[in-house]
Image (spheres, grey):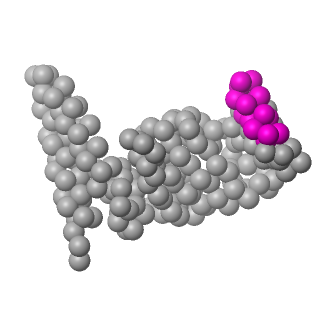
């Protein structure tokens, strides 16, 4: 089953399905997120190619369907830490994760399942607890990219002279320090 909201992607999906002679195997529906689905109708849902905010909205708007799906494979284009935080505070556990390279991009893939998981360390939400446990080979590079992003933010914040700017600088510096320590830990060969 495939779901597309907009006409262009819907027609592209229809063309792809037909070109692979899968018209009898793939049920293509037009609609928004999980709304075209009936609870219990699918065993897994893949949501990819959009930001975490949009994914969260899709999950929130169809609670009955969401509750009936045993597996979600999610590939957020941005803000994966926010998506992880949402999942573990809304009845999901992070069953598995994988980092995938495509050219210069590193994509974060999250496999979530119904269940309970408590993650207190925001650093694990930032880079993925399963990625850390498995010492994903792309994890050091992902961490370095996050450190560089925080350093760019730090340069902007340093221009502020308010107490809040000083506090933000301390928080960012601490985040950089912890990410750097994590990068060293996951690249260490025991």
The number of discs equals 0
Residue 154, image quadrant = top left
Q: Is residue 146 left or right of residue 73?
A: left
Percent coordinates x, y for residue 11 in the rendering: 77, 28
Percent coordinates x, y for residue 188 in the rendering: 21, 69
Q: Which residues are drawn in magenta?
A: 4-19
Q: Is residue 165 visible?
A: no
Percent coordinates x, y for residue 113 in the rendering: 60, 60
User: In the picture shown, does residue 94 fall above or below 26?
Assistant: below
Relative depth, front residue between 69 and 61? 69
Seen at 79% across and 35% down, the residue is 14
Q: Residue furthest left?
A: 161
Seen at 34% across and 56% down, the residue is 139
Q: Is residue 187 left or right of residue 122?
A: left
User: In the picture shown, does residue 151 fall above or below 156?
Assistant: below
Q: Is residue 14 magenta?
A: yes
User: In the picture shown, does residue 182 fall above or below 86?
Assistant: below
Seen at 14% across and 22% down, the residue is 160
């Amino acid at each position: 089953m495939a779901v597309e909201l907009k006409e262009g992607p819907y027609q592209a999906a229809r063309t792809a399905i037909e070109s692979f002679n899968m018209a009898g195997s793939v049920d293509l529906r037009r609609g928004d997120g999980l709304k075209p689905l009936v609870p219990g109708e699918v065993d897994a849902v893949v949501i990819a190619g959009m930001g975490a905010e949009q994914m969260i909205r899709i999950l929130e708007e169809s609670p009955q369907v969401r509750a009936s799906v045993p597996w979600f494979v999610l590939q957020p284009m941005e803000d994966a830490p926010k998506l992880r935080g949402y999942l573990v505070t809304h009845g999901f556990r992070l069953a598995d994760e994988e980092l995938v390279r495509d050219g210069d991009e590193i994509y974060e893939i999250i496999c979530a399942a119904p269940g309970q998981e408590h993650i207190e360390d925001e650093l694990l939400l930032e880079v993925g607890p399963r990625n850390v446990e498995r010492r994903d080979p792309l994890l050091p590079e992902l961490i370095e990219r996050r450190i560089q992003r925080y350093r760019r933010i730090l340069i902007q914040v340093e221009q502020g002279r308010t107490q809040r700017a000083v506090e933000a600088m301390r928080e960012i510096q601490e985040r950089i320090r912890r990410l750097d320590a994590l990068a060293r830990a996951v690249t260490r060969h025991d």
